[in-house]
Amino acid sequence: MMQRRKFLQAFGLASVALALPKIVFARAVEAFKANSVDDVLKNLLGDMAVEMSDQINFKIPDIAENGAVVPVTVSTDIAGVEKIYLLIDNNPTPLSAVFDIGPKIMADVSTRVKIGESSKARVVVRTADKAYMTEKEVKVTIGGCGG
Amino acid sequence: MQRLLTLVLLALTAGPAWADPAADREAMRAFYEQRFPSIPVEAHADGAYAMDASKRAQWEEMEEFPPYEFTVDEGETLFSTPFADGTGYGDCFADDGAVKHTYPRFEGGEVVTLEMAINQCRQAHGEAALAWDSEELMALVAYMAYASRDEAIDIDVPTEAMAAYERGKQYYFSRRGQLNFSCSHCHMQISGMKLRAEVLSASVGHVTHWPTYRFKWQEVGPLHRRFVECNEQVGAEGLPYQSQSYRELEYFLTVMSDGLPMNGPASRK
Amino acid sequence: MASIKIRAKVKNGVASVKSLIPHPMETGTRRDADGNVVPAHYIETVVCEHNGEVVMTAEWGPSVSKDPYFAFKIADAKSGDTVRISWTDNLGESSANEVTLK
């Protein structure tokens, strides 16, 4: 909690300057480098147990039009969400994005990700003391005549 | 289905003496109406997205904030930047560039595409022509396509243009390449079906949404780039952009889409 | 590079912010036409501020798409508030843009 407040304070100052100093906040550097889902989750969550949940809306296509740009939306009504993690199992490094959900932000984010080959995609939503996960299979085809 | 296609082909492959673009267009539309009774002909302007719901859903998500917007903005800046002699594109193109629905045209004895008209404008005002594959030209065309959105395609085929129109039509129906396919095989005969996991779009509505941001290209590209890809995919050699055959093919296809609203640029897989 | 495009709407006190961020997002594993590896160049951190206060950060890896789209919602927002989005990438480059909510 304390670390997080310092983290945000540092940002408050840093936002005045354009460049954000790298040393001031702890990036999930190791998690982004990890090449297995287990290592990513261990790095991000430590010993925290992960519970499968049906309360996470994970919108991602079943068959991606093009693996370079796959639209993703994650939203949930679970209370007290602090982090949303997006993983693509079969990407060389599964961790795709981390969203730090401050108290003034709703747990509802969208982006577009690269999926290298057909893969399971997962979302992990973390509160102060619990982690919840949901997953979906995404097929990626390399198009023939249109590809 | 086979009989209808044969009748359509007979109607469409008559030579210049019988050329009747309006009749050709009606015959082609009738073909697609019969083949896709639940899809209004104008809806084919969305290509394969008119045919497949899950593809359409993804496409609509992309169109919420589409990646071609940066190129359109670039084009707008270029369009409003004066030439060295103080004039600008606005002196050649009316309505702030909302003229793409009137191209290609038959002028000076040949089919003139918007790209050619842009370079003609530049050269008339002492500027160097842009390369057919240049980013600058792409951005200008993207901007003008965006400005022309919702305008109904309006193309004339005057008598002197009939031969060029017929050549475009012949190209569309001629077999080529190692696979020996013509455009009509994929885009009429088996349109709506899958070929190597791709849904084949109809030719009515083919030209309305260009230029296109293809995710495959990760950039905006012109219609002629797609012609090259189609040629290569049937094992034929592609032609250079803006070559006569491609311009005449574009002319034919645009006449087939006459009356349809422009909806470019568009994102596509 | 073009600037970050931001579209924001306020409804019932919630600001829906959508952004399109121009950036190559190179993974570092792609090869160019000449066969040379294109070096990794991707946004690492995105910071979102509401009326000058940091409300959200995102950390990205190279598997976020080129010219990333990013949408989020700010609770308790109103017309006249400012929303600012800034990023830094792995090469130390950065950019920012800001809008005022209507």
Image (cartoon, rainbow, N blue to C red):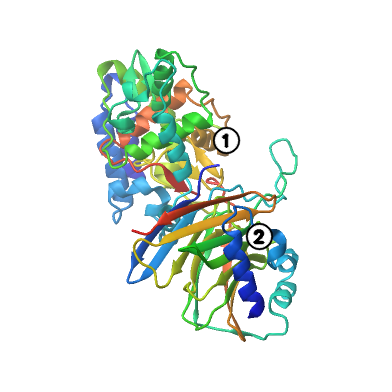
Q: Chain of mark 1?
A: B
Task: Quickly name the residue at label 1.
Answer: B232
**Residue B41 visible in the picture:** yes
* Left or right of A51 in this view: A108: left
Marks 2 and 1 on same chain: no
Picture quadrant of residue A47: bottom right
Q: Secondary structure at mark 1?
A: helix
What numbered label is drawn on residue C61?
2
Q: Residue at x 49, y 17 (%)?
A: B128
Q: Nearer the viewer, mark 2 or mark 1?
A: 2
What numbered label is drawn on residue B7?
none
Picture quadrant of residue C75: bottom left
Q: Chain of mark 2?
A: C
Disc 2 residue type? Gly
Q: Secondary structure at mark 2?
A: loop
Where is residue B188 drawn, in percent x and y? 39, 43
Q: Considering depth in this image, is A129 or B94 the residue closer to the camera?
A: A129
